[in-house]
Image: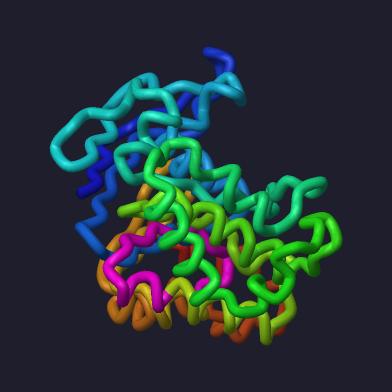
Amino acid sequence: MLVLNNIEVIYDSVFLAIKGVSIEAGAGGMVALLGSNGAGKSTTLKAISGLLAPERGEISRGSVTWAGQDISHLPAPERVRLGIVHVLEGRRVFEHLSADENLTAATSMHRDSRKIAALRSRVYDYFPRLHMRRNAKAGYLSGGEQQMLAIGRALMTGPKLVLFDEPSLGLAPSLVDEIFAIIAQLHRDGVGVLIVEQNAAATLDVVERAYLIENGRVVMGGTAAELKQNPDIKAFYLGGSGVKDYTQVKHYRRRKRWLS
């Protein structure tokens, strides 16, 4: 469904943030983008969802194709209507509205009240805790509940592909497990998932394929099993470095063969 072909993203017509990223995500697939802070993961998601413009960014080269259609220059609302929705880092809920009103706010694209009711019911099936708190102001929800609300609000658009940007950020380990279980359930229910995460271990346990982005470039890609067995991924992203003597750091960093 989704193909990024050698895209470059530039901010303020000066700063090149992404330097030729190519990835694919099949219909109903589950794909991860891994990498360190500043590698270009979030920018890649914004290039897909159309949210570069508010940050004075643009795709300067390459294309983003969805179901065979080049959507590189479509505005974000049009991409949502095509089935692509973005769950932003930091939740971004409407704090002054109730949880239920937050869900309603995402339904302007729908004209059928029965469809809206069905989508709301589906969200509450995924998040029973959110149903219990549906009349509470979103600003008074816990961090985990706000993350559930952000995901639920995205699901109210009836998406075919959900882009997740750091869904585990700032959550307790038990809540991280719950959020990942829900994302995995979405995938089993036929919704495509493209997830950006620094929690590589948890992510590789649930996705089918993954790409590693460093310095604005895709430097590695393959199945989750292949990446989990890669010695460099183990060393730098899965906590398997074993480095004790910091005088060895220089030599240790040379093992990042993808940067050579």
7 lies above or below 145: above
Residue name at image x 58 percent, y 82 percent: 178
User: Residue 238: percent from the left, percent from the top?
Assistant: 53, 79
154 lies above or below 247: above
Left or right of 243 on screen, residue 182: left
Foreground pick, 99 / 6: 99
Asked whether residue 259 appears in the rendered view, the answer is no
- On whether residue 186 falls in the magenta region, the answer is yes
157 lies above or below 187: above
Left or right of 35 on screen, residue 49: left
The number of discs equals 0
Residue name at image x 66 percent, y 71 percent: 130
Left or right of 237 on screen, residue 191: left
Asked whether residue 208 appears in the rendered view, the answer is yes
User: Residue 181: percent from the left, percent from the top?
Assistant: 49, 81
Residue name at image x 43 percent, y 37 percent: 109
* Chain part drawn in magenta: 184-201
User: Residue 207: percent from the left, percent from the top?
Assistant: 36, 73
